[in-house]
Amino acid sequence: MSQTDNNQTLLSEYGKYMLPVLNFRDIVLVRGQGSYVWDANGNRYLDLNSGQFCAVLGHSDPGVSRRMLEISQTLQDTDTSTLTEAVLRAARKIHDCAPEMNGRIIFLSTGAEAVECCLKYAKHIKEKAGVISFDKAYHGLTHGSAAYSMSRDRIRPTVDHSYVTPAPLAHVDDEAETDRCIEAFRQTVDDRKQDIAAAIFEPIISGGGFFFPPRRYFQAIRKICDDNGIFLVFDECQTGFGRTGSWFYYQQLGCVPDFVVSAKAMGLGYPVSCVIANGNTIPHAKFAMEYFSSHQNESYAGALVSHLIDEIETRDLLDQNRASGAYLLAKLNAIAAESSLVSAPRGKGLMCAFDLSAPPRLDSKQAGDLFCRLAQQNGLLIQHCNLGRTIRLLPNYAATREDFDFFGAQLKATLAMFQATLDQTL
Ligand SMILES: Cc1ncc(COP(=O)(O)O)c(C=O)c1O
């Protein structure tokens, strides 16, 4: 008896109403619980992306639904110039998680929006237009944030006064490369000193290929920024709110920025982002810059952020993320030792990755797509980045060792299928 394929039925009936901006997966998800999600045919998948790195307490966390219900039954939306108790309390909590920043906070909706707001503020205060960013950066898809990202070449018209500096890409600190990148940054600043308001960096370069520039690099950049009156901005959209085992990753770098931008985890699956301005280094004249948008400082943002911070504290999730990240990385190391397809496993807390060593004859994007498709057939939702060369894993903070054992077994099965497909087709 043939079984109805509900995924295909839904996609063929309704998929045509979606703007085709992506190659969507061939499954339709209908529910999630903890680390797992289910498709319309009842198949279960381990979600190693925690949504899009956002649902960090796992799917259907009861605390998240309780907080959202409370907000929807009390005060859902206010005019932009009115603050709510939920927002004020959450700002105080963020301030306390980042004591080095003595932060002043604005809540927004997406990472790109927070990047825009932050750089606008930085340019406004400095009365300069220039921004420097990494060649391999990703800061979002709005006109400005994309202009400071890898996709800058596709921005039409380009955003003037945007400058690029090379990122150190060695997986172990390569002194010569780090020095070369520091000098390149210094040169960019020297050449355009009068024009530059800010330098923005992902402290862990994620989409560009999972690189971890060394502490020494950022400390040198901090000094150059200080010497030249340039704001240093860390884009912690992915690294913020506990993912790497500290509240913010700058806390592991010995380098305090002038602005932190964050998003993703803090909204627990809902659109919440923020800018944290350093209260010690940034002048906070009243109305330094007016900013007024529909979803800024929303109550639900405050409620969700407070919930996340409370959960991280009461469940010791910073320690847990370090420990479970180490467990996941050890698993990747063991698999890399056995398989020539897996190389350079690396990670910090629950931000892990490895490179896929597909044969050079195969286009890396096609190889990455194929690998992720096979992983899905084996019950894993994973993503590639760096044009298919790198597989990144950003599981939820409550993922267990059993989840990672399941991942390890299914990754091996996926590698075997990948190898068999390569053998057949090449
Ligand atoms: C480091 C970084 N910055 C900014 C963004 C943009 O965030 P959003 O997609 O919420 O606009 C992302 C999203 O992936 C990101 O990873």
Image: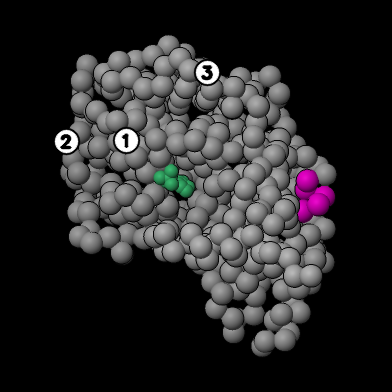
Residue 115 percent across, percent down from the top left: 35, 40
Question: In the rendered image, which residue does mark 3 sit on?
Answer: 70
Q: CA distance from mark 3 to mark 2?
A: 43 Å
Position of 361 compared to 137: left or right?
right
Amino acid at dot 1: Cys
Q: Residues within 10 Å of mark 1 (few under 14, many from 20)?
A: many
Q: Which residue is nearer to you in this view: 68 or 215?
A: 68
The residue that mark 1 highlights is: 118
Marks 3 and 1, how far apart in space? 30 Å
Label 2, secondary structure: give it: loop
Write down the quadrant of residue 413 in the picture: bottom right
Q: Is residue 405 rendered magenta in the image?
A: yes
Q: Nearer the viewer, residue 243 or 406?
A: 406
Asked if residue 141 lies left or right of residue 272, the reply is left
- Closest to the camera, between mark 2 and mark 1, is 1
* Image coords of residue 51 (percent x, y): 58, 45
Q: Which mark is residue 127?
A: 2
- Where's the C terminus, which quadrant? bottom right
Relative height, residue 331 to residue 336 (above, below):
above
- The structure residue drawn at horizontal position 42% and vertical position 53%, both measured from the top left corner, is 137
Q: Nearer the viewer, mark 3 or mark 1?
A: 3
* Magenta region, residue range: 403-407
